[in-house]
Amino acid sequence: MAFSEELKKYDWQQTTDAILSKTIADVDRALRKQRLTDDDFMALVSPAAAARLEEMAALSRMYTRQRFGNTIAMYIPMYITNSCTNSCVYCGFNRHNHFDRVVLTPSQIEEECKAIRSMAPFENLLLVTGENPKVAGTDYLEEALRTCRPYFNNLTIEVMPLKTEDYKRLTLSGLNGVVCFQETYNRAKYKTYHPAGMKSNFEWRLDGFDRMGQAGLHKIGMGVLIGLEDWRTDVTMMARHLSYLRRTYWRTRFSVNFPRMRPAAGGFQPNIVMTDRELAQLTFAFRIFDHDVDLSFSTRERPDFRDNMLSLGATSMSAGSKTDPGGYRVYPQSLEQFAVSDSRTPAEVAEAIRARGYEPVWKDWDKIFD
């Protein structure tokens, strides 16, 4: 059974009502537990938990240091095409937006690799594409991975959901992990934001995580886009999804991202605005719920917020990011997917990490040690 069937057990409105009904006693009960249920998680993301933010922060710090020490894994994204067949209303790559689409060639991808390596000793590279199988299908991704592999030890992709056999094939070309955002778990509203294209198929995207697990990927990253639907309900569904994946694919590592919507071409405005305190609460809740999950913060977030989260739950961060294809050297003026908030150089981010008593880690895994 794939998770799309499991998800049918949970009603969106009932979950929302359950979260809003939580009391401070429910929060305190959850904070005393070593192993939390999804009901406990709902208490920690509920409005009632705002009164226990300091206690949650202390627990989050403790569990993070126990599992990860004083380290922050560093990564950098490389966008290799903004060609996309989807019509996501919130995304700058929407097929209806008129701009020159860029599809990097292998030689251009290699130029981007060299540019990144000249910036900092990154070993963790995230390859990102729009969703267009005709120009960025499995063959294209395979060649891109082979081009990047001599420059980076850890390769992750954030692309359209693939078949199990395609994921397996890409692992032979150096693929270590996949990041995929479900965007929202609200099945009834999903088509509102994804009216056409591959991404409009809710089940295909959702069950992509099962296909990743079946392919034996080393690491799977997941997330919801904060700003579409009620964030408390969405992240509760994601916590249930994470628990399912851990039970089913127990050899795999997992990461969670909390991207808050940023400005993009098209002018879509978020339906929900999450405050910094709420994002901090969510971070603490996930760390207390799952002590081992990697919690990642991208350059969507402001420098001061990212710096403050260093000791409170974050375990990986991007730096020096460009969200436009070829943005590091080849096409510095192509359309970006979203605007970054932390424009510091990798060296500046690394220095900020050290100033907090933490160590930036540029390489944290190698297949030879697996």
Image (tube, rainbow, N blue to C red):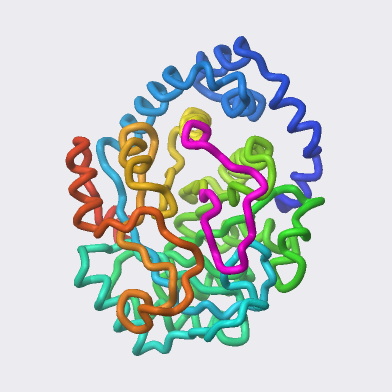
Q: Main secondary structure of the magenta part?
A: loop
What is the residue that sits farthest to the front in this orientation? Answer: 267
Residue span colored magenta? 259-279
Q: Nearer the viewer, residue 40 or 369?
A: 40
Q: Nearer the viewer, residue 9 or 278?
A: 278
| 57 relative to 201 in the view: left or right | left
| Residue 278 lies in the magenta stretch | yes
- How many marks do you count on the picture? 0
Seen at 43% across and 68% down, the residue is 323
In x, y percent, where is residue 317?
A: 35, 51
What is the residue that sits farthest to the top in this orientation? Answer: 25
Quadrant in which the C terminus is drawn? bottom left
Q: Quadrant of residue 44?
A: top right
Seen at 68% across and 64% down, the residue is 89
In x, y percent, where is residue 127?
A: 43, 70
In x, y percent, where is residue 103?
A: 48, 85
Tell me if I can see residue 208 in this picture: yes
| 41 relative to 258 in the view: left or right | right
Q: Nearer the viewer, residue 26 or 165?
A: 26
Tell me if I can see residue 247 in this picture: no
Seen at 54% across and 69% down, the residue is 159
- Above or below for 51 versus 228: above
Q: Quadrant of residue 199?
A: bottom right
In x, y percent, where is residue 36?
A: 57, 25
Seen at 38% across and 82% down, the residue is 331
- Above or below for 256 versus 100: above
| Residue 51 lies in the magenta stretch | no
- Above or below for 289 versus 328: above
| 122 relative to 248 in the view: left or right | left
